[in-house]
Image (cartoon, rainbow, N blue to C red):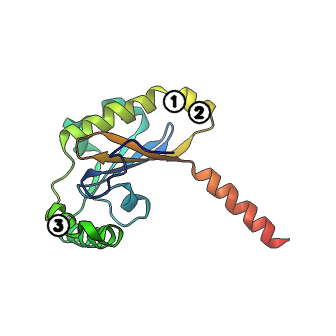
Amino acid sequence: MKLEDGTAERVDTAGGVLLDVTMGGTVYMGYTGPCFDCRELTKGKAEHQTWNIPWNELLFFKPSNHKKYLLKTINQDEYRETAIERMKFLIGEYPERRYEIIEKMPGRFEGIKTSMMENVINQVLIPLYMQKSELLQDGLEKFDVELNILKNGKIVPMEICRPERFLLKFKEVKKDETR
């Protein structure tokens, strides 16, 4: 699917979010900061902040009380390591943007911005909560949502993943191997 202009930007970003949703259970939310996207979250390379929100408290999750659900904020030494690894990746992908990448990568991690948290809550979390019945009817009891956040704050959904499909595929491959 062709993305809108600018939605595939990987250097000049405001960050990425990965949601691991268990309907009726918890919503685990990971965030990477500016110059990152959800790639580092899905590959387990970087997670700058993480929250764990019980499903029944999702409507009460606000930027003003997000620290109640905060599990971890990366320390500055760990952040620098992730920033260096991300710059190496980006320079490998976009060698012509080398100086721009180095210039735009923040030297310190400052935490998620309030406006960004509000956007994720209002544009993603609350709509998911409100569609619980429909999602369960479709068999989506557990799924991941990958989001990139553009510099202008626009949230770009990149993928919705059902872990069951990978488990089923793995079982089918294993079954074929034993024949």
Q: Tell me the element at label 3.
A: helix
Marks 1 and 2 sit apart, C-alpha to C-alpha, by: 6 Å
- Give x and y (percent) for residue 31: 31, 52
Within 10 Å of disc 3 (Cα), the crowding (few <14, some 14-19, many 20+) is some
The numbered dot on residue 76 is 3
Disc assigned to residue 136: 2
Rendered location of residue 9, percent (x, y)? 32, 52
Q: Earlier in the sequence, mark 1 or mark 3?
A: 3
Q: Is residue 109 left or right of residue 177?
A: left
> Quarter of the image containing the C terminus?
bottom right
Q: Nearer the viewer, residue 99 or 167?
A: 99
Give the camera-side residue of 50 and 97.
97
* Kind of residue at badge 3: Gln
Where disc 2 sits, the SS reads: helix
Q: How far is mark 3 from mark 2, CA to CA?
A: 40 Å
Figure label count: 3
Q: Residues within 10 Å of mark 2 (few under 14, many from 20)?
A: few
User: Residues under labels 1 and 3: Cα distance?
Assistant: 38 Å
What is the x, y in percent for residue 1?
Answer: 51, 45
Q: Position of residue 36 (x, y in %)?
A: 29, 58
Q: Look at 24% across and 72% down and name the residue there.
A: 84
As drawn, is 14 to the left or to the right of 160? left
- Badge 2 amino acid: Leu
Residue 65's disc number? none
The residue under label 1 is 132
Tell me what residue is drawn at x 68 percent, y 62 percent.
170
Q: Is residue 122 left or right of residue 132?
A: left
The answer to whether residue 130 of the structure is visible from this angle is: yes
Left or right: 2, with 74 as reference point: right
Q: Can you tell which quarter of the image residue 121 is in? A: top left
